[in-house]
Amino acid sequence: MSQNRSNSGMTSTQVVILIGLGAVVVILFVFILWIVFGGRIQLPSFSRAPENTPTPKMTSTPVVFSTLTPTPTQTPIPYEQLIPAGWKQFKTGLVEIWLPPSFKTIDRKSDEELSLQGATSKNSLYTMAATISFEPLTGGSLDAHLDAGLLKMDPQTRLTERRKVSLNSTDAVRMQFEARVETVDVNQLTYAIQDGETVWFLYFTAQINEFYDMLPTFEQSAKTFRTVK
């Protein structure tokens, strides 16, 4: 018995199979769209932003607004704990500082509040010294005051370091200098501290071969500096 053929030359059975395949394709296509757009399948966690991540806010320039973490306030160490055992107090009517007992007070110049001399080794050609002086603030800020002073510095003296530090929660500027005094290489550690309209200077000076051995001592001594209120 011969099979019925359509006008296109296909039998009715082939037409039914073709329609069935088309329906399957349509169903698969719809199912895929449902998965992509309407399904509940969760994407991997690494492709999702954490809930607490700041969301970028689009402006003329992309900016991410993040939570600001306040800088913790430094708690000053009790003054007595800053003084190494066995050190000696040096005090005037205006200031106080502590140094090893090998230092002693010497006659000071008119622009100095306190002048101290340290024990010097037999091989040293320069006398170790610690000096405190002060002057009125000019220029409106400590940085401006220091900038003006550095312009007047002896050209043979070289500034090797300048940075802001904290001396037991007191803001200061730390500077280090190198110079040649006659035939001797000398280094100086300087701290500048603003106290209202006054600038205090701490100077620690030694021959270069002694300077770096004494540097931790100088730094610790600077922490014991305070004005007498």
Image (tube, rainbow, N blue to C red):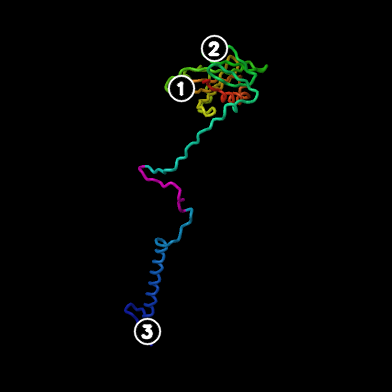
| Residue that numbered label 2 is attached to | 109
Q: Residue at x 54, y 27 (%)?
A: 167
Q: Which residues are magenta?
A: 47-60
* Circle 3: residue type: Gln
Q: Position of residue 15 (x, y in %)?
A: 36, 77
Q: Is residue 43 left or right of residue 97?
A: left
Label 1 secondary element: loop
Q: List x then y, in percent, for residue 31.
A: 41, 66
Dot 1 amino acid type: Gly
7 and 73: which is toward the camera: 73
Q: In the displayed structure, would residue 32 be above or below residue 73?
A: below
Establish if 108 lies above or below 214: above
Q: Which mark is residue 196?
A: 1
Which residue does the numbered mark 3 point to in the structure image? Answer: 3
Cα distance in 3D space between marks 2 and 3: 128 Å
Q: What's the CA distance linking mark 3 and mark 1?
A: 112 Å
Instruction: Name the N-terminal-most of marks 2 and 3.
Output: 3
Q: Tag 2's secondary structure?
A: loop
Q: Going by the image, does 121 lie left or right of 58?
A: right
> Eyeballing the image, is 59 above or below 196?
below
Q: Nearer the viewer, residue 143 or 209?
A: 143
Q: Residues within 10 Å of mark 3 (few under 14, many from 20)?
A: few
Taking the view exactly as shown, the residue that stands out farthest to the bottom is 1
* Quadrant where the N terminus is found in the figure: bottom left
Q: Nearer the viewer, residue 55 or 125?
A: 55
Give the number of the mark in front: 2 or 1. 1
Q: Which mark is residue 180?
A: none
